[in-house]
Amino acid sequence: MSILGTAVSGLLAYQRALATTSHNISNASTEGYSRQRVELEARNPQRLGGSYIGQGVDVSSVRRLQNDLVDAQLRSSLSNAAEGEVRAEFAERVDRLLADESTGLEPVLESFFNSTQDVASDPTSLPARTVMVNEAETLVERLHQINGLLDEQRTLINGNIETAVEEINQYSEGLANLNARIVSGFVGGATPNDLLDQRDVLLSKLSEKIEVNVNAQDDGSVNVFVGNGQSLVMGAVSNQLVADHLSGDPKNFDIGLKSKNNSGSAPIDVTRFMSGGELGALLETRTGMIDDAQNQLGLIGLNLAMQFNDQNGLGLDLNGEVGGDIFDIPPVELTANSTNSNNQLPGVTIEDVTKLTADDYRLKYSGTGFQLLRLPDNEVVDLDHDATTDPPNVYHADGLKFDTSSLLSPAAGDSWLIQPTRFAATKLEVAMTDPEGIAAAAAVYAEPSDLNTGDGTVLSVAAVDADTLDLGRVVLTYDGAAFTATAEDGSTSTVTPVYDSASDTTTVTHNGWEFKIQGSIAVDDEFVIDSNVGNQGDNRNMLLMANIQNERSVEGNSTIQGSYNSILAEVGTETRQAQIMRDSSATLLEDAQAQREAISGVNLDEEAADLIRYQQAYQAAAQVIAVSRTVFDTLINAVR
């Protein structure tokens, strides 16, 4: 090759280098732009005589400066930072509304229990009774208020979930389109650097919405997976996420995956697999904080209301009547799955509130039997059935009674969402309007006969079973082993007592009441149990109601106020953890962005230096061309 050809190759190479440098400078502020660099290589030399003569230079490639590992770390950091920000934002809101005295439950709980103590101190006081009813109404209103505020957060979360899903679908469709263009670009042998940058920008934005796993393919495309391997983008095809009530919960949006190649099929529920990013944080916050708080709040309300109702039904009010309900208890919330064979619902009731949990459940029919799953982990819960006492279709679990006799023709796969406590806080109401209805007095009293020879004294007597409670007069006569119970009509029955040697007490259970005797009982000793009607000053039942405050009745291990304090502590801990995650992930994101910027970012000072260097090289190549022209002219003139 001539000197002119060598010079022209340099001119063209440095022209390309200048153009690339100009491209870098122009895109210094472009989001996601990766610096490009022209790679030069010497042409194959030409043998001339005993040596080789260089033939000039070629542009081998325009290289995009980036590192796959650094980019993957940046995507992970973006996902974690977005997750931390969303979790902290909602956690702080929930923490404030639960702990604030103006919106929290603790002050009104304290006021309500104080009012029960006031009635116990003066059971005939109508003003004290009125205050107790008013405090019950205030308590219920506060439960409604807190639950409403939590519902507002749920509504906001659901709206954000819809928005996040829409954006994820937009990004995934954009990625599929870019994949197609990039594959076409690679066919010519060149690398479409700017298209790769655009794709990385979309991958980063997608990572902010949800954690992704990106797999590069040999043809230049990438496949994108979410969750535990659900495909979102496969080459030039993108699947879609949908936000819908797939689990049957009318209050929550679930996440479904819908194949673009099979658009007519129902979406697959992948909610439990979604993690990371804004969407993962929204789902985790809703399930782990909003759902839990509302369920716990409902459990507290049900425990208090049902225990007060039960105890009030075991005493006598100011009119000498057995007490009625103080609170109106809402039914267990049931929802049939939208894919069920019919709309029939099982019967589910609370039979022991002290065994009730704050969990949601799903009852499933397999085709041969029923299975109970605890949500959201789908842990199997044993359904107890006593063949000797239970009807064929009745089961028991976690303080609940299940009656499936109403399910006349269930099909395999049918399921029902059961939420015993979710809506209790918002549906609980005060049933009592007349303060005289508070049953402060015990339903029965007991007294020993003056002729007794033993030293047994009356320790206590109280109604324990409203369903079997009989207030008729009963005389208990001891025969040395058991008691003969003689009713007013002269009928008799034998009652076997239970003796506790540790406390030296004898317990007699009969007619819905429980009678305890302290000390030894002699043969023919008698005790009379009779209605307590007319003894309005009696406060024994009110003392039992007031003591509900101290009973560890919530899930069998916590007091009502203790349970609420546990909610506050748990939410406070989650809030602090979310804040720590937000702060630490923000720091890690800054580090990841700085690392990428060091590799891929445009340094204007460096580009200015390259511009001068390439300009000088270009001018030198042009000068060589001028020299070659002079040489050529000299040769032409020499042969004339």
Image (tube, helix red, strand yellow):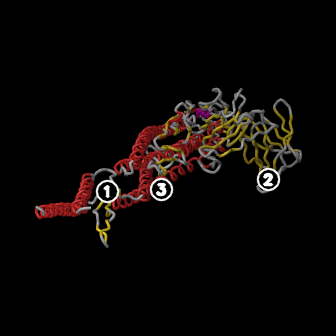
Q: Secondary structure at mark 1?
A: strand
Q: CA distance from mark 3 to mark 2?
A: 50 Å
Q: Secondary structure at mark 3?
A: helix
* Quadrant that contains the C terminus: bottom left
Q: Residues within 10 Å of mark 2 (few under 14, many from 20)?
A: few
Q: Which mark is residue 500?
A: 2
Indicate the amino acid at tag 3.
Answer: Gln
Q: Residues within 10 Å of mark 3 (few under 14, many from 20)?
A: some
Q: CA distance from mark 2 to mark 1?
A: 89 Å
Q: Earlier in the sequence, mark 1 or mark 3?
A: 1
Indicate the amino acid at tag 2.
Answer: Asp
* Quadrant that contains the N terminus: bottom left
Residue 485 at least partly seen: yes
Q: Which residues are magenta?
A: 327-334
Whether residue 241 appears in magenta in the rendering, the answer is: no
Residue visible at 69% across and 30% down in the picture: 411
